[in-house]
């Protein structure tokens, strides 16, 4: 018990001085209470490898590359757990996995999937974006995840978040020849420093509680002139809504 207090005091002290530490990359710890729809995905041993977004009581949107080749049996969704080392929230099993039928690899687009949970959860879901207005360049979006805090760092123990402006399709085309505006959207800063990174894939890019992107790919993390690329949720709205409404489990 006394050791626990000491650890807590040290955590506060060091947490308080860690403001310059890169998180996500260049972000900060955020409270899951403020973002109850953000989830992480693990294998059967509990190892986190991707993020996701709860969009209905039994449905999670994630990246195609997070779900392809996996079985429902070997995959778990963790809801309501900000700290991977805590036992808060719920570990939920799956009854189905749907991967976009056009998915081949993240940089080819169609990098979306829907996981169906075996039991409904009570956490508040996010909304799917409607229309184009939130894709206006400069829109302040927010990315969240438990991924690496720099290219070389291990994945984060805690949920991290970072504000990233939506980047124009022209700027992103300059950055990546594989960028396709029909299926992707970029976010980040020309000078780098803030970005998602490995392990954040599948997780949300939101404006408020509205999902506009799914973390998909990028060259390294937070490099200058290399934005993060996100699946353009608006382009997949209809097919995602179909999957969300579906009770058969793809
Ligand atoms: N593909 C990575 C993953 O599986 C996500 C990469 C995001 N990269 C970036 N620079 N924004 O976790």
Image (cartoon, rainbow, N blue to C red):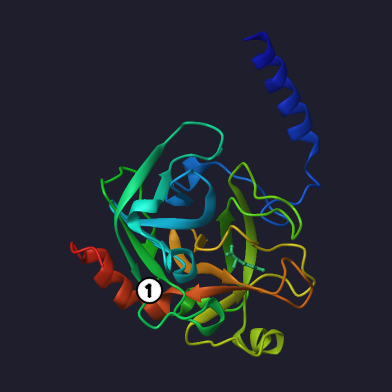
Above or below, comparing residue 48 to residue 172 in the picture: above
Q: Is residue 10 left or right of residue 181?
A: right
Question: Residue at (26%, 46%) from the top-left corner?
Answer: 120
Q: Is residue 166 left or right of residue 122?
A: right
Question: Residue at (53%, 47%) from the top-left corner?
Answer: 47
Question: Residue at (55%, 39%) from the top-left corner?
Answer: 84
Above or below, comparing residue 116 to residue 90 in the picture: below
Residue 142 visible, this orientation: yes
Residue nearest the viewer, comparing 162 with 107: 107
Q: Secondary structure at mark 1?
A: loop
Residue 131 visible, this orientation: no
Residue nearest the viewer, comparing 135 with 71: 71
- Image region (quadrant) for ligand 1: bottom right
For the C terminus, which image quadrant?
Answer: bottom left
Question: Residue at (39%, 38%) from the top-left corner?
Answer: 90
Q: Position of residue 219 (x, y in %)?
A: 70, 74
Q: Position of residue 192 (x, y in %)?
A: 77, 69
Q: Position of residue 130 (x, y in %)?
A: 37, 74
């Amino acid at each position: 018990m006394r050791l626990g207090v000491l650890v807590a005091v040290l955590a506060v002290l060091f947490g308080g001085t860690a403001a310059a530490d890169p998180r996500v990359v260049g972000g900060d710890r955020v409270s899951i209470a403020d973002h109850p729809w953000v989830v992480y995905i693990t294998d059967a041993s509990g190892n986190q490898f991707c993020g996701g977004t709860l969009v209905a009581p039994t449905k999670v949107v994630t990246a195609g590359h997070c779900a392809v080749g996996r079985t429902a049996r070997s995959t778990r969704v963790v809801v309501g757990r900000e700290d991977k080392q805590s036992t808060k929230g719920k570990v939920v099993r799956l009854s189905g996995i749907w991967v976009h039928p056009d998915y081949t690899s993240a940089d080819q687009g169609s990098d979306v999937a829907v996981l169906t949970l075996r039991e409904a959860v009570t956490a508040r879901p996010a909304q799917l974006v409607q229309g184009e207005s939130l894709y206006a360049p400069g829109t302040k979006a927010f990315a969240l995840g438990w991924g690496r805090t720099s290219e070389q760092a291990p994945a984060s123990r805690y949920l991290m978040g970072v504000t990233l402006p939506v980047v124009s399709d022209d700027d992103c085309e300059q950055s990546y020849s594989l960028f396709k505006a029909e299926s992707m959207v970029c976010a980040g800063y020309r000078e780098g420093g803030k970005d998602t990174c490995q392990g954040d894939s599948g997780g949300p890019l939101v404006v408020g509680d509205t999902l506009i992107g799914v973390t998909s790919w990028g060259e390294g993390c937070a490099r200058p002139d290399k934005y993060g690329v996100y699946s353009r949720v608006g382009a997949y709205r209809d097919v995602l809504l179909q999957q969300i409404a579906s009770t058969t489990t793809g």
